[in-house]
Every structure is written in C-alpha cells, then in structure tokens.
Amino acid sequence: MLAPVQIDGHEIQPRDEIHRRKLEALRVFVERLLASPARDQIAKIILFGSVARGDAQAESDVDVMVFGSAPLKRADDAVVDSAWQTTLELGESVEPLVYSIGTFDEPISDFEWHVIKTGEEVYSMDEATLARQAAETLYGLAKQYMGEARRKYEPDLEPSRRTSIDVAYNAAELAAKGMLRLVVSELPKTHSGINTLFSAEYIRAKRVPSHLGREFTLSLKHRNLARYDGNAVISPEMVEEVFRFADEMIALFEQKLDEEDEQENHSRH
C-alpha cells in the first residue's frame, strides 16, 4: 500500500501511483501558496474532480477551488504563480479556480455549490479569521450596493424607484448577513430566514435597536412589491424608508466590525 500524502494536516490515501503523483502535486501547490505573501488571504482550498474522486488518469489535471479575501487579485496572482511553479517542478498540471470568500456561504453557481458540497477540503483558515474576512467582504458589497442605489435613483421615475428599493434592500441584507457571520458559522438561504435569524441573534438579544425588526420586515415587503408586483404603487416615501433602513444597517455593521477590532487589540495587550 502506498503511503498517505499529508497536505496541511489532511491525510489522503492514494489509490495508485498516478493518484499519488497528483496528490503530491497538490501538496506542493498548497505549500507554495501558503508560503506566499498572500497566505493571510487564502481562506479555503478544495480539491475536486478526478483527483478528489480517486479515478485520475495520467493526463488528468489537479483541479482545485481556492477561496480568497480582498484584494482578490493579490490572492489570484499568488494562486496562478504557485500552480505554474508546481507544474514546472513536477510536470503535473494544477488547474486552480479562485473565488471570493464572500461566495462560500452563497455560491454564485450550481458548479461552485457542487464543488463545496462534494469536494475535499485540504486547507481552511481558522473559523474566527474566516468569519471576519467573510464579514469584511460582505461589508464592502453592502457599501457598493447602497452607493449604486443612490446614484441611479430618480424619484420621478417608477422603474427607478423599483430598482432602487431592490438594490438598497440587498445592501441592507448584506449588512445583516455580515453581522450574522460574526456570530454564526452558517447563514440561512432565504430572505425570511435571514430576517428571522437576525431578529434572534441581534434584536431579541438587544445587540441592536429593537425598531430594526419592524423596519427589516417592512423593507422586505417593499422590496417584494417593487420586484414582483407590477400593479403595486411604489412611492418615493417607500424608497426613502428602505434607504434609511439600509443606511442604519450598514452603519451598525461598521460599528460591529470596529468593536471586533477593539476586542482583538485589547486581547493582544
């Protein structure tokens, strides 16, 4: 029997010599990547495809999905360089795909979801750091969405009012998800699920003002009308209500991130 291949504490048993060579290429790739200046941005590495299944052929690539944090280009450059150097050294093709860690909880495609569910995780940063980086990514997205909602808002045009409500609600929900990611490891998949969990973890726990519970529900109602009901009258007042809610959620999210920083700095001293 071939000896297991150790990859950052994960032990994988090769099926045959070809599989062993592929796993060795994976080991070298992971070591190179984690030794790069982008190490702190590498959140997860997942092996998938034929090497993960154990039925690789000589010509098979080593397929890996890497989740990184912003700035994603820095992580992407390190991933590409590590894969290329591994291929040059061992003659085995490492084919990486790089995704933002912000998509790990909510995959952007069926393919990404399938890899997350069926692939083999060979590296993960610690949960606290992972949660923080995922939250920061969601904060950046929330700010972008809210800025876009305001820039494109034209109060006199109903299509603009509908779009602005939709985008601003998305910004508020991203802020809710980010705050939740600081305290839970898995997020609900539905809008109502996010609302319910946020109410439990933050509103009933008195971590945020209680009026946000009503505003969350009202904003979701406005968003659903704006998106799905072509006969609904969407007023400028409805837009402003969602804008105020989103602004408050983003401000609270920023406050929670600052509090996390203060606690971390205090623990170091």
Image: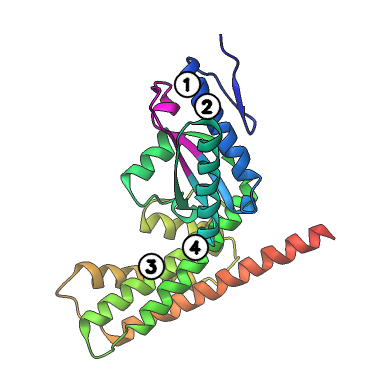
- Total numbered labels: 4
Residue placed most toward the observer, 109 or 161: 109
Label 1 Cα crowd, 10 Å radius (few <14 / some 14-19 / many 20+): many
CB under 8 Å between discs 2 and 1: yes
As helix, strand or loop, the secondary structure at mark 2 comes to helix
Is residue 49 left or right of 82 when viewed as pictured? left
As helix, strand or loop, the secondary structure at mark 1 comes to helix
Verify whether residue 52 appears in magenta.
yes
Q: Which mark is residue 23?
A: 2
Label 3 Cα crowd, 10 Å radius (few <14 / some 14-19 / many 20+): many
Disc 4 vs disc 1: which is toward the camera?
A: 1
Using the rendered view, name the quadrant where residue 240 is placed.
bottom left
Q: Name which of mark 4 and mark 1 comes first in the sequence.
A: 1
Q: Which mark is residue 19?
A: 1
Residue placed most toward the observer, 91 or 194: 91
Q: Name which of mark 2 and mark 3 comes first in the sequence.
A: 2
